[in-house]
Image: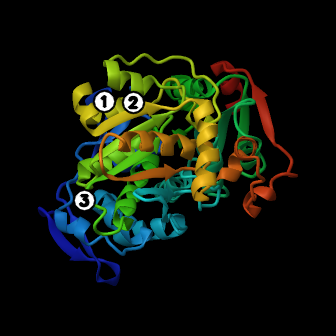
Amino acid sequence: MVHRPWSIVHGPSSKQIYHLCNTMHYYSTNNRNHHATLKEAVIRGQAPDKGLYMPERIITLPDTFYQNLKGLSFEEVAFKVGWAMFRDDMELGDLKNIIDNSLHFPMPLVQVEEGIYSLELFHGPTLAFKDVGARFMARLLGHFLKNEDNEVTVLVATSGDTGSAVAHGFLGVPGIKVVILYPSGKVSPLQEKQLTTLGQNITALEVEGSFDDCQALVKQAFADTELNARINLTSANSINIARLIPQSFYYHYAWSQVPKGEDDKVVICVPSGNFGNLTAGLMAKRMGLPVHRFVAATNANDVVPQYLRTGQFTPRASVSTLSNAMDVGNPSNFARMMDLYGNNQEALAKDVVSCAIADDETSATIQEVLQRTGYLLDPHGAVGYLALKRYLKTETATGIFLGTAHPAKFIEVVEAATGQPVEVPEALESLRHKEKLAHKIAPHLEELKRYLA
């Protein structure tokens, strides 16, 4: 392949696709001198020095790229952005197949009220935004492993939606075993059924602790030399770059759906826990996406909002809230955000403002928005909506918040807030009577190692 500065070639359907010269490598956030190919970064999940992989450069797409996004399907947008990033690592046809086979569900931008839209990311197989990253990663990892002989074990921690998305995304993929760690009693009943009823190559471990305990176990497992000598481990958490990059696709798609005349100043609010979703948005902005600012919306687990205010990052034990998928006290992707902004709090704060929403505000927002607009929010969407509304009192802009999960996944919380029954999609209703298959373990590495052995 001949490498050139920015050039244009014609892909499928004669769509214009932009190329950038030089092979892309990925470095560790702990050591910029450590480099890996995309294949190595995806298979390893985490760098050997416990750092997270970042692309050595964030490509800049020309203005004409964004001018031509309007009216394209999500698959077309994803392909154009993905080809600009991955062209040195796979054939054009392979990338197109990965996208076509993983990202074929709708992601509509729905107007909730004047000037405020919801990007509904919950129309995939597990009704959560994490279907995007998990399904893309499963097929990308399968692509890289198709000629390998050794089995790979995907180890993932979840506070709810990640586990189910990963489980469904990797179900039946040859050569891959999936082990999911989730905190006992801290995911919704339907979320638990989604990740504990599949069998086959999917195993669920119910950890007697918090999500932070689950995440710590995953990190300890990757750092354990003896364990990694016996088992080929990789991660499907947002610490894996293959989960993160495809999430940047839907930020481009969201902007492309904003009606002309309303897209001059766009603010996007991201309900945030482990901050992978926001990091993907910030990468999209670095690529040239014309988003004015991001709002990082959290629940009571507000270590990042505190950092943006004070410049002090102080991780702490997570606390349980109604928006449980965001109950993270030590977000892994904070390291990536810091790397992206040169560890400069002032630089990050220019692009990101933050807001923490309490549980009583979450419930009140679900009820108020339904009564006033007819739009039903899940707890995480309610956090994003209210944080966005507060920001828009300070500046006139078109606002988008990410609808990260279907309200039925949190039916107890939503029905308690609204006093009305929630219609449960068949994909969830069918799980109610399935048998839970999970092994309970204490939050200790030795127990995890004994199980994996």
Where is residue 448 shown, x and y percent of the image?
67, 26
- Give whichever of 26, 80 is nearer the camera: 80
Relative image position of residue 16 (x, y in whole percent): 25, 75
Quarter of the image holding residue 156?
Answer: top right
Q: Amino acid at mark 1?
A: Met
Q: Secondary structure at mark 1?
A: helix
| Mark in the foreground, 3 or 2 | 3
Identify the residue position indicated by label 1 in the image.
338
Mark 2 = which residue?
334
Dot 2: within a 10 Å radius of its alpha carbon, few (fewer than 14), some, or many (20 or more) residues? some
Compared across the picture, whether 131 is left or right of 453 comes to left
- Mark 3 vs mark 2: which is more N-terminal? 3
| Residue displayed at 58% across by 54% down | 372
Name the residue located 32 percent from the left edge and 72 percent from the top edge. Answer: 70
Q: Amino acid at mark 2?
A: Phe
Residue placed furthest toward the front: 372
Point out the frontmost of discs 1 and 3: 3
Q: Are marks 2 and 1 in contact (CB under 8 Å)?
A: yes
Look at the image and tell me in which quarter the N terminus lies: bottom left
Which residue is found at the position 57% from the left and 57% from the top? 373
Picture disc at residue 443 = none
Q: Is residue 59 left or right of residue 297?
A: left
